Amino acid sequence: MFEEISRKLDSAFQKLRGKGKLNEKDVTAGLREIRLALLEADVHYKVVKEFLSAVKERAVGNEVLKSITPGQQIVKIVHEELVKLLGGQSAPLRLASQPPTVVLLAGLQGSGKTTFAAKLAARYKKRGKRPHLVAADIYRPAAADQLEQLAETIGCTITRGEEGESPESITERAIRKARGDLKDLVIVDTAGRLHVDDDLMGEIERISAVAEPHETLLVVDGMTGQDAVNVATAFQERIGLDGFVLTKMDGDARGGAALSIRHVTGTPVKFVGVGEGIEALEEFHPDRMATRLLGMGDVITLVEKAAESIDHEKAIRLAERMKRQQFTLEDFADQLKSLKNMGPLDQILGMIPGAAKLPKGLSVDEKGLGRVGAIISSMTPTERVEPVIINGSRRKRIAAGSGTSVQEVNQLLKQFDMIRKMMKRAGKKGRRGLMPIGF
Amino acid sequence: MAGFFVNLKRGLQKTRSGLVNSLKSAVTRQDPEELREELEAVLLQGDVGILAADRLIKSIQGQDGDRWQLLEEEMLRILEGEGENGERPPITTGGPHVILLVGTNGSGKTTTAGKLASKYAGEGKSVLLAAADTYRAAAIEQLQIWGERSGVDVISQERGADAASVAYDSLSAAIARNMDVLIVDTAGRLQTRSNLMDELKKIRRVLQKQGDQYPQETFLVLDATIGQNALSQARLFHEAVELDGLILTKLDGTAKGGMVLAVRQEVDLPVRYIGVGERADDLMEFSPKEFVQALLE
């Protein structure tokens, strides 16, 4: 996400950083590139204008020119202004004091409402809550079937309409049922509608009146162009919005819509959809996003992901073993597994500081990791602890068992040997903690 | 073509009032800097993109003559493209005409497949739909409902099946039944997911196994409300499966068809259809001339 802007801003600042002192010309030149980057990222034209004038006002002033490291000073200013633009603080979903919390979803056709509804339900289900889905889209063919199939995957309940039932009636019935069944969260998925379609905007007004939602979220495609601002304003005027969801942000969409919407409507972006899997949903954090925008990487999200996917006891035991230099192939396989649990590797890579500088199109060889797992699984427990005993015939057996070649087995053993040696050295220096393997 | 005008104008109503009024005031500016800045503001807000906007501005700057007309002419030049504005391959009787629809999630592929099926069926052609989106929940059911509406058979397998195998079977069926047209709906995918793009290449490959001519046309379905990412989509999908053209959907909102200019300018692919509504007949053949006229009129 945002790699493209990051790369562009980075190159703009590279030039600024190279100089000891900055004059107005340098600043203007740097900002021109930022302007292009933001416009190409679909940030709204007017927002770009305001943003740049705010930055320039601060940058060209004494603050920069007299500071010892003017380049860094500008980075700091751009960062601060970006955070401001993105909303300053993160805004989580507000749960009602008296459950169930009712969440109403609205948006254009194809923005990703149904997928988001399922992701949100899955997220709260994972936290031990009892979500209930409502299929209030009576127009798109098979929309209710789609939500029902997703509900089944998540293992949560759903209300769908009877033949000819209105969305208002479906919603009302669903909320009543959810209340009776002591559900925590009711998520109302509505039909996609154009903000200029008066009939359908009237319909969602009526749905909203019936649902009395605690949170009304507008689901916006992260690839949306300049029109995002019009869409957001129109929905806000009709049904009032508590937040936005930005979807499809796992591609190369630069997500300028996030900056625009937040700035123009004053309503926070709450979630970001980052993939097709049911778990591919992140809370929106303006500060982290701004950091990422500047090519500094999103270390906090990375750490959180790691915390979610790594088994703590195992991690502690592993750290102990590494300290005592007893790291085995089995531990190696475990680490690979938790690495994979963190999500698609190319996404993880995007969060690492400086990753924006990596060549575009660089992809992580997930299949290769899978093969490594297979090779280790084909070893006997003794072999995993004492790889020295793996001779030629054992290598052949392992290669055959894992569907790989002897060369690949050799390569893995060689790599593992190197890792062990590195750990030995690190251990001598007295360093602790996990080593990120695979990067 | 009269229908094109009425429908398109209805769809572009909002677009026109905003874009046209600002453009009209912008072209009257005498100061060159002011002219540039105002034109750029209007064009960029219309998602035209920086390169296309630059080209349009240059076409007016320092030129004598009716600026309005100059602008119209340049827009038309962009839309008609640099390369040969190739004719579409005709639908012949020698085997099915296969149309492969690709695009990102939610761009409107399934709806477009349904509309295309209805269009060809309405013209008296025998049509078959292939439900090769085996990933998204209920995508198959959605296409089946479209099929029922226009009396077109849908070839499908269960959800999670191999998309390429559905495509292959569908083409075999279309050949065996001597159908005129086969429309293949595929799963939405972001263009940066290389594994999903590989799946798309495979679909194309297996279609070609039954004859080099298949698929006769591959269209990228583009949501007109999206911005500059359309360029990345056009480039990467083109790289993967050799596109023959674009279908722009959802032009009935306030999204300003400016995307058309950006895509044509930077990736030389013609727009073939535009979608301006949810009804089966809300799909129209794209005509650059009438599009520009309707936009600027």
Image (spheres, coloured by chain):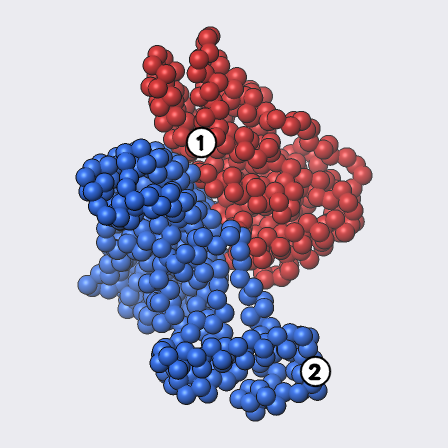
Residue in the foreground of this view, choosing between B24 and A145 = B24
Point 41% across, 78% down: residue = A426
State the image quarter where residue B168 is shown: bottom right
Crowd around label 2: few <14 · some 14–19 · many ≥20 (10 Å): some
> Residue reaching furthest top?
B65
Q: Give chain A's shade.
A: blue
Residue at image mark 1:
B50
Q: Is residue A170 visible?
A: no
Crowd around label 1: few <14 · some 14–19 · many ≥20 (10 Å): some
- Residue B125 placement (x, y as % from top left): 71, 36
Image mark count: 2
> Residue reaching furthest right?
B94
Point 57% across, 91% down: residue = A382
A51 relative to A278, above or below: above
Residue at image mark 2:
A396
Q: Disc 2 is attached to a residue of which chain?
A: A
Q: Quadrant of the C terminus of chain B?
A: top left
Point 58% across, 57% down: residue = B195
- Measured in 3D between alpha carbons, the distance from the residue under mark 1 to the one under mark 2, in whole angstroms, is 59 Å
Query: Element under label 2?
Result: helix
Q: Give chain B's shade.
A: red
Q: Disc 1 is attached to a residue of which chain?
A: B
Q: Is residue B37 visible?
A: yes
**Would you say A365 lies left or right of A2 here?**
right
**Would you say A69 lies left or right of B257 here?**
left
Query: Which amino acid type is shown beneath numbered disc 1?
Result: Ile
**Would you say B17 lies left or right of B262 here?**
left
Discs 1 and 2 share one subunit: no
- Residue A102 placement (x, y as % from top left): 28, 57
> Residue reaching furthest front?
A20
